Amino acid sequence: MSQPGEHPINRVREVQTPLKILLLAAEVVPFAKTGGLADVAGSLPKAIRALGHDIRVAMPRYGRISPHRFNLMRVLDPFPVPMDDRSEQAELMQTSLDGDVPVYMIENARYFDRDCIYMYPDDAERFIFFCRGMLEAVKRLDWQPDIVHCHDWHTALIPNWIKTIYAHDPFFENVASVYTIHNLAYQGIFGYRVLEVAGIDEYGFVVHPDTVDLNEVVDFMGRGIFFSDVINAVSETYSREILTPEYGEKLDPLLRDRRDRLFGVLNGIDLDEFDPATDSYLEANYNLESLDQRVHNKLSLQREAGLRQDPHVPVVGIIARLTDQKGLDLVTSTLEAVLQHLGAQFVLLGTGEQRYHDFFSELSNRFPEQAGIFLTFNASLARRIYAGSDLFLMPSRFEPCGLGQMIAMRYGSVPLVRAVGGLADTVSDYDPVSGNGTGFVFTTYDPMALYTSLVRAVETYRHRDIWRELQVRCMQQDFSWEKSARKYVELYNRARAFRAQDRTA
Ligand code: ADP
């Protein structure tokens, strides 16, 4: 049995046989985005395509996705999708990612022609329709996938259907499933009724002796874990953490049962999109050879944030959803001391819970020259913070992967993180004796631990040559998708092997 953390996929060579993969997600950049899932679903397929595999993407055609802007073409006549004891009509549209990866969109005005992507009372039904519609659509296309790659709860019923209502359908006989967990905190929990809508009520609840809270609800995430041929989380550390009650969000017993099928694959970032040498949002572009130019971004950020312009004051940045997950209670407990005693400046960009909005608004009133607060979502300002801050703070309570620390490193902002999930896998603690490390790392979830790391970081910042070496090491890290795409291809092959093995068992 393979253990999460020492995955055989890390040791296996790239596979030569081209695979056919259908990747399904609720959001995909550039068509629709609310979070990191969309970044992954929009960039991973391009990297897998580059390895020679026939990967295609599927998502709903939300009302806000302009057919004209994205050149959507209708590829099938309207077709029925079984829903409960009736059927609903779907249409299938097609476009592509960069002209390279085909993208299918399931269309139905009643379900998807709305202002937002989620947060509707019939979300379960909407995503059941999307997923079931896509399985019905793919049978009508002249293309049979080897793999369905599902992401998060919205697409988690697909492996469930393949092993139940489609179990005797020759089209799906050899189709293996991979299920990627982006964040176990969002599980998609609904009542019995959705089993009827999904046509799987005769199979009932998934019951496990150690998940009593979940035995009489329909937990989409739990079903994805239970029925998939292979499961992965978006970093190796998170794939181990979720086996424990502390991080398992009540699904750890189920995950422990399936640990031989559970792997970790770190997300990448799009190196073309996030490139300080070409980023048009910056005051000054720079790379490793022209790092001296970076200071212009710092001065311009200080101006934009209303802070005193001074190249020598350390600027600490945060860009985050303002939720408990991001460790903001540690930040609110220590920030005043950081501003008063360490003399640092602070820039925050984020939206979220009201109590954090209140706290940071008040802070900026009290420290107008030291704290620049932007309670909004602003992608271009985010780039300027990555390029203009000296330190980038992510003291998360839990962090499945985290993109912020990787982007920060690419832009030469040194990360200060808590050693959890993907943060532990991407940032190593600076060791002044050996001179190694790419940031500042603390472990205990405690304000004092954060404060001590900040003291260490600010002290290190005073030594210009040491800081420059740290920045250079950060910028040299390889967070390209290529490495992770190869690991996903290994997972696809592993899923096929498990599927074949289970079918003959
Ligand atoms: P999560 O997916 O948990 O929100 P990640 O670190 O994985 O956290 O990804 C967050 C991404 O969203 C990063 O690219 C970050 O720069 C961006 N982001 C978060 N909040 C904002 C904001 N208010 N404005 C602009 N970009 C933001």
Image (cartoon, rainbow, N blue to C red):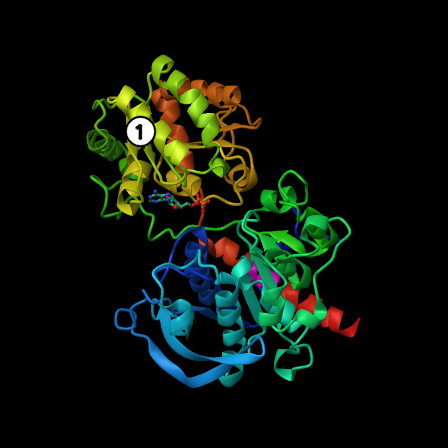
Q: Quadrant of residue 415?
A: top left
Relative to 278, does residue 29 appear above or below in the rendering? below
Q: Position of residue 102 (x, y in %)?
A: 41, 73
Tell which of 167 and 270 is nearer to you. Answer: 167
Q: Is residue 207 magenta?
A: no
Quarter of the figure with the C terminus: bottom right
Tell which of 289 and 190 is nearer to you. Answer: 190
Q: Residue furthest right?
A: 505
Please report the residue visible at 31 percent of the width from the left and 29 percent of the height from the top.
361
In this picture, residue 136 sits left or right of residue 281: right
Please say whether residue 414 is visible from this viewpoint.
no
Please report the residue visible at 47 percent of the width from the left and 84 percent of the height from the top.
79
Relative to 160, does residue 485 appear above or below in the rendering? above
Relative to 168, does residue 308 appear above or below in the rendering? above
Q: Which residue is mark 1?
A: 361
Tell which of 439 and 156 is nearer to you. Answer: 156
Crowd around label 1: few <14 · some 14–19 · many ≥20 (10 Å): some
Q: Quadrant of residue 495?
A: bottom right
Q: Amino acid at mark 1?
A: Ser
In this picture, residue 226 sits left or right of residue 415: right
In this picture, residue 498 sits left or right of residue 83: right
Count of numbered circles in the view: 1
Q: Position of residue 26 (x, y in %)?
A: 46, 62
Please say whether residue 97 is visible from this viewpoint.
yes
Q: Position of residue 440 (x, y in %)?
A: 47, 28
The segment highlighted magenta reads 488-492
Per the picture, the main secondary structure of the magenta-coloured stretch is helix
Quadrant for ligand 1?
A: top left
Q: Secondary structure at mark 1?
A: helix
Q: Position of residue 313 (x, y in %)?
A: 29, 21
